[in-house]
Image (cartoon, helix red, strand yellow):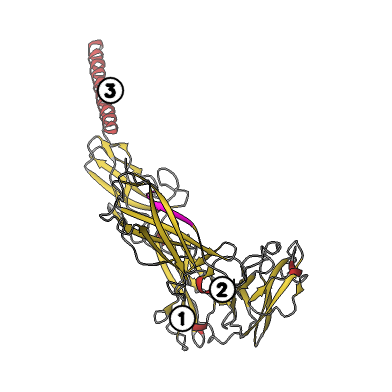
């Protein structure tokens, strides 16, 4: 019995030991299997533009433990991007390849791709980072509309219309369409040059036509254009004249001087103008010159400043009229009117500033009052002289249009150029070329030039002004 019992115990111990070894082996095998499944070491990435109709492409990422296959699932995430593993994003049916073409349901969302790597020992799923918010080009849902009166001179204004997909900018183009209104997209209408603002002032060429505006909405994904409905047929102006550039005065504010004024620039087709010079206080008066005194008889665009204006300022007031009414505006005030200058010699035109040569009548005469020479010193090497002469008259006023003649004395030193006219500053320029007779003497110190100025209506012998001028000569240089 004892012997038999010991034998049984030994067998039982061996069995227990064998069971324990088997359990340890199984546990080791399970542990080994868990440790050999793929492990992600670099998450998947997505390339491509987050724009509808663009293609996104995913990488699998990087893995250890030798994955033998990869599965892809594109998911649509909230604008926040969702959880890093994409578990709160919606799987897109059928989107199980590395490439995905974005569609309208993706607009306003962010995209991720979930990649599952597998091998014989198991699998693992990770998600990419989220894309930018998916954009689509703007889409018009309500066309632009135009407000305002369809008449020449009126200002029209357009809305942008209503758009989806968050436009970031709008551009405008006003179109001139046939009386029928043209096609709904304005493709048979003519673009109006420069009319690219949200408002447009109806002009004469629009009369009898209809207008539309084309609005282009854009964002980072692209742009789209929509046209407004056509306006009514454009009618003639029903508005009084409107000043868009006020009258302006030119001339010197001095007793005896002549001032000139423009009537300004107007809109709405004035048919007549009424002009009035006004005498204003030293302050210049109110902007519309309503506190300035109308000068009796001064109703043309020119005015000779009178002694009564001394110490005052002058303004030119214009009233423009059409069949719909009239509007009055005034120029800016002149400087304070100064006293008259020295009395003008007999034969001089009134006023100040430049005078035309043929306006100078006897006994007034032309005067040669200044000269210049380039080079300032004539040297042995000088080959060309440029001489300038200034002509004045009537208390020093520059003379325009006088004919100036110049010749060196003796005559064979430098060439004699043709007569030249004085410009608006009173100067005439003549060019002389060196001749064989220069220098006239070995110790020559001066070059003498005979100068004559005459009016175009005068003969050479009757020339108003003659004089000899001299320029320095240095033959040592």
Q: Is residue 21 above or below residue 321?
A: above
Tell me the distance, in whole angstroms, between the alpha carbons under discs 1 and 3: 97 Å
Q: Which residues are magenta?
A: 370-375
In the drawing, does residue 161 fall left or right of residue 12?
Answer: right
Residue at (61% x, 76% y) in the render: 263
Q: Is residue 408 left or right of residue 435?
A: right
> Which residue is at 68% across, 62% downward?
335
Q: Is 374 within the magenta? A: yes
Q: Which residue is mark 3?
A: 20
Left or right for 456, reference 321:
left
Quarter of the rendering containing residue 31: top left
Q: Position of residue 195 (x, y in %)?
A: 48, 72
Residue 58 disc label: none
Residue pointed to by mark 2: 362
| Secondary structure under the numbered disc 3 in the rendered image | helix
Foreground: disc 2 or disc 1: 2
Check disc 1 and report the residue beneath it: 176
């Amino acid at each position: 019995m004892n012997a038999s019992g010991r034998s049984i115990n030994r067998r039982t111990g061996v069995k227990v030991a064998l069971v324990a070894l088997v359990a340890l082996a199984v546990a080791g095998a399970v542990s080994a299997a868990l440790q050999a499944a793929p492990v992600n070491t670099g998450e998947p990435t997505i390339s491509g533009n987050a724009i509808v109709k663009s293609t996104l492409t995913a990488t699998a990422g990087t893995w250890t433990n030798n994955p033998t296959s990869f599965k892809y699932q594109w998911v649509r995430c909230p604008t926040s991007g969702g959880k890093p593993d994409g578990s709160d994003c919606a799987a897109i049916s059928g989107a199980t390849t590395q490439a995905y073409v974005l569609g309208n349901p993706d607009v306003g969302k962010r995209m991720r791709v979930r990649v599952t790597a597998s091998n014989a020992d198991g699998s693992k799923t990770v998600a990419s980072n989220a894309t930018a918010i998916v954009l689509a080009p703007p889409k018009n849902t309500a066309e632009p509309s135009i407000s305002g009166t369809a008449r020449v001179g009126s200002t029209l204004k357009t809305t942008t219309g209503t758009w989806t997909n968050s436009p970031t900018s709008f551009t405008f183009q006003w179109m001139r369409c046939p009386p029928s209104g043209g096609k709904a997209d304005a493709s048979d209408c003519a673009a109006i040059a420069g009319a690219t603002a949200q408002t447009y002032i109806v002009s004469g060429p629009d009369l009898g036509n209809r207008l539309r505006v084309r609005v282009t909405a854009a964002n980072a994904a692209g742009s789209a254009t929509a046209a407004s409905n056509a306006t009514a047929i454009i009618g003639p102006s029903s508005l009084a004249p409107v000043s868009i550039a006020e009258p302006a005065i030119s001339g010197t504010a001095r007793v005896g001087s002549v001032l000139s004024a423009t009537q300004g620039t107007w809109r709405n087709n004035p048919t007549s103008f009424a002009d009035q010079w006004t005498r204003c206080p030293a302050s210049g008066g109110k902007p519309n010159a309503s506190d300035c005194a109308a000068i009796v008889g001064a109703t043309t665009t020119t005015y000779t400043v009178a002694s009564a204006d001394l110490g005052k300022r002058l303004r030119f007031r214009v009233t423009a009229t059409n069949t719909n009414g009239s509007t009055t505006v005034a120029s800016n005030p002149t400087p304070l009117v100064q006293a008259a200058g020295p009395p003008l010699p007999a034969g001089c035109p009134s006023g100040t500033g430049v005078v035309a040569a043929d306006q100078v009548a006897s006994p007034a005469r032309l005067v040669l009052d200044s000269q210049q020479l380039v080079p300032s010193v004539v040297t042995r090497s000088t080959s060309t002289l440029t001489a300038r002469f200034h002509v004045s008259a009537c208390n020093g006023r520059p003379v325009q249009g006088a004919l100036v003649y110049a010749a060196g004395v003796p005559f064979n030193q430098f060439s004699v150029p043709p007569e030249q006219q004085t410009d608006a500053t009173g100067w005439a320029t003549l060019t002389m070329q060196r001749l064989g007779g220069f220098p006239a003497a070995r110790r020559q110190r001066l070059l003498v030039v005979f100068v004559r100025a005459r009016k175009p209506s005068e003969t050479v012998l009757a020339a108003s002004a003659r004089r000899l001028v001299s320029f320095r000569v240095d033959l040592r240089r």
